[in-house]
Amino acid sequence: MIHEKLARASEETNAIKPLGSEAGILSQVDTFPKLLKRHAVIRASSEAMREKDFGIWQSWTWYEVAEEVAALSNGLASLGLVRGDSIAIIGDNRPRLYWTMAGAQSLGAIPVPMYQDSAADEIKFVLEHASVRFAVVEDQEQVDKLLSILDDCPILETIIYDQPRGMRSYTQDYLHDMNDILELGRDFGCNNPTYFDDEVSKGKGSDTSIILYTSGTTGNPKGVVLTHDAIIQTSINAAVQEGLNDKDECLAYLPMAWVGDHVLSYAQSYVVGFCVSCPESSETLLTDLRELGPTYFFAPPRIYENILTSVMIRMADSSKIKLKLFEYFMALARRVGPDILDHRPVSLFNRIVYGIGDLLIYGPLKNALGFSRIRVGYTAGEAIGPEIFTFYRSLGVNLKQLYGSTEASVFITVQPNGEVKPDTVGVPTPGVEIKLTENGEVMFRSPGVFKEYFKNPEETEKTKTSDGWVYTGDAGLVGEDGHLKIIDRAKDVGKFIDGTMFAPKYIENKLKFFSNIKESVAFGDQREFCAVIINIDSEAVGNWAERNGIAYSSYQELAALPAVYDLVQENIEQINRELAQEPNLVGAQIKRFLLLHKELDADDGELTRTRKVRRNFITKKYTSSINALYGTASHCQISTELVFEDGRKGLISADVMIRDAQLFNIDKQIAAE
Amino acid sequence: MINKQADQQFAIDVSEVESVFLQGEYKEVLLDIAEVSLAFGGVQALSDVSFDIYKGEIRAIIGPNGAGKSSMLNVINGFYHPQKGTITYKEEVRKKMSPHKAASQGISRTFQNIALFKGMTTLDNIMTGRILKMRKGLFWQALYWGPARNEEIINREIAEQVIDFLEIEAIRKTPVGKLPYGLQKRVELGRALASKPDLLLLDEPMAGMNVEEKEDMCRFILDVNEEFGTTIALIEHDMGVVMDLADRIVVLNYGCKIADGTPEDIRSNQGVIDAYLGVSKNK
C-alpha cells in the first residue's frame, strides 16, 4: 500500500530534469543515507540497482534498496556496530556490499573498502590501522583470508559474508550469513521502529564518509579520509558539468576500494539517482556491457586497448568484402568522426558518407561492444595511446580523459565536450583550482579535498597545505588553451644541463604508443640532450619484416637491421616534430638512439614484475652504451649477462649501431647531422 | 577358492558393520552391489565384486588399468548387465535395467572421454541434462507456448543454478567445442548435475587436467557433495586427489575386489601396494 502511494508520488516528480535545478535541495540532504531516503520517496519505483544473477538482470528500486539498507543497518546495529566504528568491505561489486556502505554510514560508522585481490598481510595492515571491528566480505575466499590473519588481528570481532557457498562447515560464532543479519535487522526494526531514522538524521555532512586506502608503491598504504560534503559536492559539480540525469546507466565493475568506482557507482548514483548495474562476474564483463549499453562509462586505458585489439583481430579474420568496408569507413571516421562528434564543420558529402558508415559499420560495431548509448565515457589512470583514443571518438563514442586522485574525490580536470584532445587531461572541473609549483608539480584545491590521511599527520602535512592546496606528485604543464597535460611523476622529472625540463616517462610513453616499439628508456637528466635506448616489439617488427621479404633469424639480428633502424627513426622523428610544437618540451627532442640487442626482461632485473622499467638499474647496467650515446661514435660494443629461466647465466654481446635523429625547429642550435 | 574369497568378503563386511555401529552412527546404504560378475565372452571383467555406497558419501573406485573400474560404473548405470549378482538401489533389487531408466531413477554420470555435443553451447548442453524431466511432448515443445514455455523456464532456472554453481557464466553461450579441455569437463559435470541426481558417477573427472584445474574440480566435487548432499562414486587415477576426497575407497584388480576401506586403510594395505607397484616373483 505504502509502496503504491510512493510509486504514484514518484511518477509525479519523476520527469527527467537536469540536476542543476535540484542542487539547491541537495544542500539540505548532506549525507548519503539522507540522499537514499530522498530517492526512496521521489524515485520509489525507479530502478536503483541491478545485478545479473542466474543469467537474468535482477533489479531493485530505490524504495527496495532503502528497505534493504535499513534492514542491514539495523542488523549491524544489533550486532553492536556504533557511530565512529570502522567496517571493512571486501569483495567484487555486489549490490549488498554497496548497501553495506550505506547501511554503515546510516549508523555513522565508516566503511573501509579493500581491494578484493589484496594479500592477507595487506588486509591485516588496514584492519589494524583503521581499527576495524567488523568485516563484511563477499565469499568463502575472503573469509578464509580473514581467518588466516585473525590470530594476529584481535581487534576484528565479526565477519559477515554475502555468499554462503562453501560455508556450511564453518562453525565459528563470529561468522554470520548476511541473510541472517538482514533477518536480525528486520526484527530489530520492528522492535525499534525509529532507530534507523534517528541515526540517519544524526549524520552531518562534515562527518567522515569513507576511508579509502591507496595502494602505496612505497611503504604502507595511506588511508584517505573523505567527508560526505567533499564527495557529494564533487559529485554534484561533475554531474552538472556532464549533464547527468536519473535515466543514465552505469556499470559497476572497477574495484570498490578505488575512489573512481566509489564516486561513479555510489556517490554520483546517490546524488543524481541513476541506476547502477553489477556484472555477473569479472569474466562476463564484456557480455554484460553489451547487454546493458551504459550511458556513463569509466575504464582505464587498458580496457579500451583490449577491446580495440579484439575488434582488430576479429576483423582480420572476417571476409574480404567486410574487411574492405571496415577499412574504408574507418579511414573516413578517423578523418571526420571526431569533428562530427564535436559539432565542428564537416562537408555535407562527408557527413552523408559518415551516415552510411554509421548504418553499416560504426553502429553495429558500437552495438557489439555495448557502446551504442554512451554519452559520457571517461578514461583515466595512465596515458592512453592516441590511436586508441581517436578510434573510439571517430566511432562517435564520447570518450574523454579525466585526471583525478583519491585526495580530490576523483575529479580534478576533465576534457569538456568539444575540446577533447588526445594528449591533455582537460580543464579543471567546476569548483576546482589548479596551479603548478616551480618544479612543475600540479597542485589543486577543491571542495572535494580530503580531510586527512588517517592516523598519519606527517603525510597529511606534507601533502596538504594549511590553505587547502594539495600536492599531486604529478608533473604537468598548462597549455595556452588552459588544458592540463600530465607528463610524469614529479620525482622522476629531471633537468637538462641548460635547466630545461626533462620528463622521461612522457617521452617513453609517446614512443611506446608506436606498435614497433615495445619498451624504451629515455636519458637526459643532467645531460645535454635526450637519448633513448629502445626495445623493438619483435612481433610487430617481425611481421613487418616478413611482409617486406626481409630475412632475419633472431631478435638480435632483427634489431640490428638498418631497415629496422629506419623504421624506428621515422617514429622518433614524428615524436620530435610533435615535441617541437610544445614550447616547454622543444628541448626534449630525441637526438640519438640505439636499438638494444636483447629484450628488457624481469628475469634480468631490468623490468619489475609488472613490466615497469627500472631506470636506475638500467643506467648502471648499460653505462658504456649510455656514454656512447652521449659521445660521437656510430657504434658501441655491448655485452650483457642474461639469466635463463632455469637460473643459468649466459653472456650475450653485440656491436650495436647508434643513430642520430633529425631535430626540428629548435632555438638551441643543436644541429641535426 | 571362491568360497574362501567370499568368506574374506564376509569378514570385511562384518568388521565394517561393527565399525559403523561402534562409531555410533548408522549410515543408510544407497546402492549395494553383491557378488556381481560380468564377462565379455572369455574375458572376465568383474568377478564376484561386492561393495556398497552410503547415502551422502564420496566413494572412490580405484585400480590399475583394466581393473574393471569403468565396467563397474557401466554396471551401476545399467549400461552393462552383469551375468551374476544383485544390485540393490534405494532398497529395491534391480532387475534388468537400461541407462535411460537408471537416469530417471536419479543416477547420472560423466565420461572418461568427454561426451558433450560439441556444436551446442554450454547452456544447451546443460539443458540436455534436464530432458528426462520434461513432460511436454513434441507438439507442445514445438509450439513453445503456455505449459511448454513454463516448463522451459523452470528447467532453464535449474540450468542457471548449475552454471552459477560451477562458475561458468562467462561461457554460457560459447559452443562447447571451442572450450579448453578443463572447462569441457566442468560442463560435463554441469550436465550431470542438471538432472539433480541422487547418485553421481564420475569417470576420471580429473584426467588430463593441470594442477589448477584439478584443484577447481576437487572443490566442485566437494561442494556438490556438501551443498546438495549428492552421493558420489568416482574413478580417479590421481592418488592424492582420491585420498583427499573420498570417504571410502574400493580397490579393484583384474576384476576382483582386493581392498575396501577408508583412505588410511587403503594406503597401508599391502595388496593394494602390490597391485599398483607389482610384486616380484622371487618374493
Image: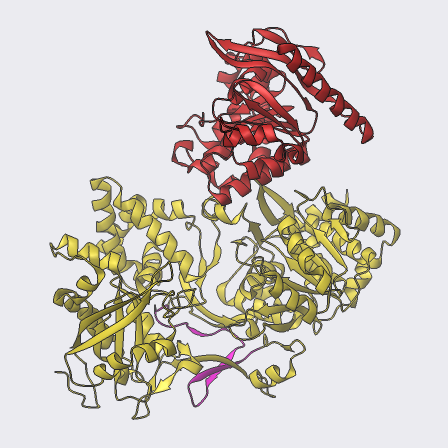
Task: Name the side, left or right, on which A375 lies relative to A183.
Answer: left
Chain letter for red, please. Answer: B
- Which of the colour schemes (rainbow, by chain, secondary structure, one colour) is used? by chain
Quadrant of the rendered structure where residue A556 is? bottom left
Q: Can see residue A35? A: no
- In this picture, which residue range is highlighted in magenta? A419-446
Task: Name the side, left or right, on which A482 lies relative to A9.
Answer: left
Q: Can see residue A445? A: yes
Colour in which chain A is shown?
A: yellow
Residue closest to the far bottom: A498
Look at the picture and state if A390 lies above or below A670. Answer: above
- Where residue A519 sits in the image (x, y, percent)? 31, 67
Residue name at image x 51 percent, y 49 percent: A282
Is-magenta flag for residue A439?
yes
Q: Nearer the viewer, residue B194 or A595?
A: A595
Look at the picture and state if B243 lies above or below A42. Answer: above
Task: Name the side, left or right, on which A101 lies relative to A314.
Answer: right
- Where residue A165 sits in the image (x, y, percent)? 66, 42
Quadrant containing the N terminus of chain B in the rendered view: top right
- Where residue B96 sits in the image (x, y, percent)? 59, 6
Secondary structure, magenta segment, majority class: loop
Residue name at image x 30 percent, y 58 percent: A337
Look at the picture and state if A216 lies above or below A671. Answer: above
Look at the picture and state if A318 lies above or below A569. Answer: above
- Where residue A333 sits in the image (x, y, percent)? 27, 55
Is-magenta flag for residue A662?
no
Residue closest to the far right: A191
Q: Nearer the viewer, residue A73 or A170?
A: A170
Q: Nearer the viewer, residue A300 or A68?
A: A300
